[in-house]
Each structure stands twice: as C-alpha cells, then as structure tokens.
Amino acid sequence: MVSARQPPPPDDFGGEEHTETGMRLGLPLPSDAADPIDAGASSTGFKKIVEPPVQDVAASIDASAVPAAPNCTPPHPGANALTVDDVANVDALPPTAFLNRELTYLNFCWRVLHEATEARTPLLERLKFVSIVASNIDEFFMKRIGGLKQQAMAGLQVATADGRSPQTQVAECLAAVAQLERRRSEVLETTLADMRTQGIAVVAFDELSADEQASVREHYVNNIFPLVTPQSIDPAHPFPFISNLSLNLLVTLHFPKDQDMRLARVKVPIGNGISRFVRVGGGAHKYVRLEDVMAKTLDLLFPGMVVESCHQFRVTRNANTERAEEEADDLVELIEIELRERKFAPVVRMQVAGGMPTVLRGHLAAELGLDEHSDVFEAEGMLRQRDVMELAMLEIPERPELRDAPHSPVQPADLTAKRNIFHTIRDQKSLLVHHPYESFQQSVERFLKEAATDLKVLAIKMTLYRTSRDSDVIKSLIKAAMGGKQVAVVLEIKARFDEEANIRWATRMERAGIHVTYGVVGLKTHCKSVLVVRRDYDGLRRYAHIGTGNYHSGTARLYTDFSLLTCVDAIGRDLTELFNYLTTGYEPRRRYSKLLVAPNLMKAALLKKIEREIAHQKANGNGKIQWKINALEDVDIVRALYAASQQGVQIDLIIRDSCRLRPGIAGLSASIRVVSVVGRFLEHARIYHFGNNGRGEYYIGSADAMHRNLERRVEVLVPIEEARLQAELRALIEMQLAEHPGAWHMQSDGSYHRTDSALPHAQVRSTERAEQRLKEATRANRKMQK
C-alpha cells in the first residue's frame, strides 16, 4: 500500500473548496463594489504562458460539442479504455487511471446546470441554477485557473497523477468552460423566453414605449446616475483600475468638430442596493438591464459629444495571494495585506460582449497585460449571468408555482422536550441533527445560547471557520464572556473570501474578553467543534458539538449537514486535547481515543480501515465501504480504494463534485459505483462507513478525501456509535443511492448519466423523514405528559 504521507501534488495549490463560496444558492457572493471610483495605476497581468503544445491540446478538444442526451454530461477528456495489463499493479497505474480534479469539478457544474432544464424545477428556480453555475465559473477562474497560471509562470512542469502539466490543465479547462458557458447561455435564453410567456419579461430599452423609456430614464437620473463616474482613457489619465467581476462599459466617442476618437470606461454600479434589472413602471413584471439603460443615456455622462459605440467587458482577478504565515509577526496584519493585494491581483480572464471590435479588444488586453488570444473571451449571451439570481428571488405571491414551496426546518425530534438542553443530551448521551431538514437554530444555536446563560457552564471552546453576518453564535459567545465564563475561540481568518468578516469578528470578540487564537501555523483549522464544560450534579462534564458544516445560519438552511450533540466522556477528552493543540500549536504525544484528527492521524486511519475491509473480504467475503463526501482527490486514497475493489470489496461512493477515481473498470474498479446527488439543497455532509465484518463503523465530520484536508488542515471525524443514530445515517445513504431524480451515476469515462425516476428526490424523502420523526416524538411526549 502507498504511503500515508507524500509531498503535496503539483495541482493542490490550496484555496477553499469551490462550493464553500460557490454554489451559495442565493447567499451574498464576494463583493466587487469596493472601489468608490476605481481610479488607480495600471494593473499588470500574468506573463504570457501559453506555448505551442498547449494550443495543440486545446485544438484537439471539440468545444462546440454538447452532451448527446439531455440526461448525460460530457466524458472526461482523455479517459481512455484501460486493459487488464494496465491495472494489474495498483501502485504503478498509468495516468489515465486517474481523472483530473479541475475537469471533474466542471462536470459537476454540468449537473447543476441540468437542474435549470428540468420540468420539475419551477420557472424562477431555474434561474437560480444558472446563476450558481455562473458564480462557480467565476470562482473557478479566480482560484483554480489563477493558481494553475501561477504554477506555469513559475516554470512548474511536474505532471499531476492524471499526467497533465499546468499548461495542459489550463488549456483543457478553458475548452471545457467554453462548452459549459455556451450551454448555460442557451439555457438562460430558453428560460427567459419561457418567463415571457408567464408575464415576466426582460426586454431591451428600445422595446419600451416612449412613456416607458421616459419613466426608466427618470428613475435612472434620480436613483443611479449620481453614482456613476466616467473615466477617460488617454495619455493624460492612467488606465483605470478595473475591479474584480465588475461590469463595465467601454465607450468610444469624439467631439462634434473633432473626429479623433476617444475612449472612456464607465462602471455599471451593481450592488449596494442597486439592481442589475430595472423594473419598468406599472404593475407588470417587465425589466430592462441597467447597462442597457446606461448605454442609451450616455448623453448625460458626455454632454455635447458624439458617442460612436458602447461595448461591455469584465475581468476576473486571481484570488491566490497567500503569503507564508511562518514569516509573519502578526497574522491579522498579514491577511489584511493579502486582501489588499487580492484587490489589485493580476487578471486571469477578460470577457467581452459580442461585437467588440478587434482593435478595442487588443487595446484593453494590452493595458491589462493580457494575451489577446489566450486570456480574452467573447461571452455567449449576457455578461455576469450570476446576476439573474435577482430575478430568481422575485416575490410574486400571486404565482406561488413559479418558486419552490417554502422550506421550514422542523424542530429536531430529540429536542422537543421543554427542558434544559444539557439535561436532554445527558439523558440520551448523543443525538444527531440533520440540517436543513431539522433546525440549526433550535439545535446548535440553542446549544450555545443556553451555554451562555447556564450558571453551571464554566467554559466554552469553539472553532470558527465561517459564520453569518449577524451571527447569533457569536452573540452567544460574547454574552458568555461578558457573564464571566471562560470563552476561547480558534478563528480561521484565512477562510477564503470571508477573511474581512472574520477579522471584524475577531476584533469584536477580543473586546468582549474572548480569548481568540488563529490555530496552528501552516495549517487551516477546518474542523467544526464546540466544547462546553459544565458543573453537573456529579462533577464536571464535557458537552460537545461536532458538525460537518459551518456555524452559519444562512448556509444551514441551504446545505445538507449533520450535527452531533454529545456528552460521551471519551469524545470530550479528545476535544480537550484538540483545543489544547489548537491554542498552543504544541503536538507531542497527543492521544485521541475516539476522534480521527488530521493532519497526523486521519489519513493513516482511513487507509488502515480500507486495508481491514480487504482482509474481511478475503476471509469472509463481506468487505464493504460506503462514503458520502464532497470530493475524492487524494491519490493515495484512490489507490487504496482501487486495491480494495480488485479484491471484490463492495464500495459505494456518494461524491458531490470532484472525483479522481474511475468506477466500473474491469480488473480495477468493477465493484465501485459513484453517485452524485444534485438538488434543491447543496449536499455538504460527510459520512464514512466501513462494514467491519458486521460491526459497522460510521464517522461524520468536516473532511473530504482530498490531499489538503488530510494533510494540510486540522480536521475531525467523530464516530457515531449509538445504533439509533447509525440507523439515521444508514437511511440517508440508502435513500441517496436509490434511483431518484437527483442521482447521477458516474461512468468509467468520467461522464454522468441520470435516469428518469418516478421516486421522490432523496432530499424530499429526507424532508418527509424529519417531519415524521418529529410527529412521532411529539406523540411520545404527549403520552409521557399524560
């Protein structure tokens, strides 16, 4: 078996998982409106990195191809057939045995986009999925393409496990994105056309009547025009700074008696209360895009001048600006520097609307330091399609069928009794909450709220990665500290795109007397855990929460996650050890009896458990592995799963997005199936199940099977040992593996196929299961009261 520790693979250059901030399902995305005027020095981009071999690779990919059937996604480029000889030695597999992380993530975006084409998806909800994919692609360029270009600039030529250099990955990703964006624009146009038939129209300014144009113009003058700042582009003015993801107009104009052409840039001020879609007066749902209004009213910005043309463009900047924190005296100051650098980071992509003349494209590319042929892209359809989320969120009470039925998390079945939450946990030892079907507010937030006011609680320790803007979690911590309790928070201020918010929270918590630390140098603290020390009737007792998701009330209504509330003493002792490590950085001889902790123990433990299943398969024929995770990228883990499959171990993998492993290959992975579940909620929970010769083991936690999670982060997996809680995890696994409308089955070529099914979606069944559990618990409580 391969070693549990290896040097970081070349393509694992850090950064958050795409879907922590991408695919937010309507949550606020990173702001692009930070620059008041956007005036500044010229921004320099990456050096040209494209070489002839890369052009050959890109040319070999048919970017115009689309899936042959509506329920299929494209195959993985280069996923060739493997022979028996190719797979005989699992430690010497050819590169084609592994899929590429970036390309498999883009395939996930295809599956998300498919939700926008489903007849079962309400009309406005389809726009949500279009927006999510657009946001995901923006972040893909900011983090993944940006990082790959950095590697290429540094001259890194070491191939990944799938045999691709950084340049090759960039070329293949760009081809795949072109195909995906073409399809996304088609879906958007179809959806907008369908909306028109339902009385919701996005129209061009020229389609409006004279009275409507006058009304829109008046609204623009009174509410938006004062925010607009035109900027000249000429030798007397430095090229303006173009903020990340902003939408911009490039205007060509001249004086009436002077034919010398001049250029100006105008930023479209979307955000901070200004909508992309301007509603036309009256009762009808008719909208016109703001940039269209601005283009038709340029006489207000340039009075007396002749406007010749107006073209739209936007840029995407690299988000990989991390510095070595080992050299920092002040980590907060280091992150603040990184944030400033990110604002001015090199451009990795420029998009222009169709019809921009070549000379203007070339001028912009030169000013931004871009290669006109490899870094500039003509967009399909409207730019910044992420903004259609505004339309998806329209409130039309008289047309409820246009939106999903409102979802309200139910009260957790194990927390229905009106009593102290610590007494409930103490009586049950452990209880499991399934979000968003069961309420985060009535479980996790309640746990912290009662801890803050309970006179017997002496101390609260917590890891914090992301939280909401108006966080009740932090309010409870502050209340606890101000009430005299010992409160310690390990805050991960390097959570990508949440750094500024986390720095603000750190300052606020420190002012309240909370002991704030930032974890271990060189490692991100990604685990989700709370430890509460309470003086019970029989002495000090540790109560704990360990979850698969962040302490964020917004995402807790949109992401599927598990929360374990427990007072099992061994888990409490392990968490004490973990927090001592996190607050000091000292790790010698730490011992954990229950938890699997990364980076030092988790990967080796998972590999050992895989080997144990191989032994059970050889001895008894009952080897079994079932995982539900967000991504499978670590090469050592993939090799171990291949080795297990070669011995006949039954392996079921429910993997949301990236997956390096190829299932269903004779002699290598014939006993492995991979299912991806896509639906209304973002699948986010992690479950690791091992058959263990009939004595099943279940773990939940924060870690995916990725190199960064297993070797470069502090992560925790906690065992679920109570039979009734294991039954809940077993039920979820079976529901997700069953045929249902959200189940996509991965093929050996890297494509995914979905079959039409009359069964309810697994997420619908999870909703029904939570409601049924609550009804049963309510009836049981009533009987006890009688």
Image (cartoon, helix red, strand yellow):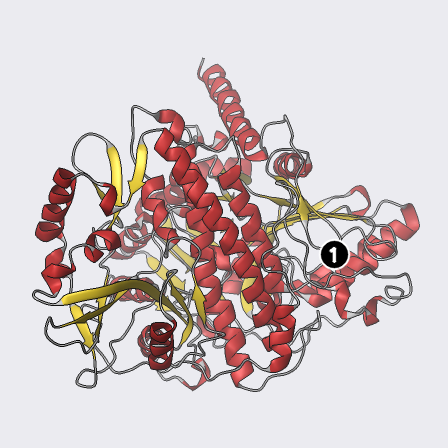
Q: Nearer the viewer, residue 113 or 768?
A: 113
Q: Secondary structure at mark 1?
A: loop
Seen at 57% across and 47% down, the residue is: 111
The number of numbered discs placed on residues in the rendered structure image is 1
Q: Nearer the viewer, residue 214 or 86?
A: 214
Q: Nearer the viewer, residue 467 or 136?
A: 136
Q: Amino acid at mark 1?
A: Arg
Residue 75 locus on image (x, y percent): 68, 54
Q: Is residue 278 visible?
A: yes
Q: Is residue 567 visible?
A: no
Is residue 283 shown above or below 140? above
Residue 240 locus on image (x, y percent): 24, 76
Which residue appears farthest toward the top when viewing the image?
A: 786
Seen at 65% across and 32% down, the residue is: 756
Residue bearing the label numbered 1: 662
Q: Quadrant of the C terminus?
A: top left
Residue 731 locus on image (x, y percent): 64, 34
Q: Quadrant of the N terminus?
A: bottom right
Residue 536 locus on image (x, y percent): 44, 45
Q: Would residue 120 be found to the left or right of residue 163 on screen?
A: left
Is residue 684 shown above or below 487? above
Q: Would residue 142 be found to the left or right of residue 695 on screen?
A: left
Q: Would residue 759 be found to the left or right of residue 376 on screen?
A: right
Q: Quadrant of the rendered structure where residue 639 is?
A: bottom right
**Mark 1 packing: few (<14 Cα in 10 Å), some, or many (20+)?**
many
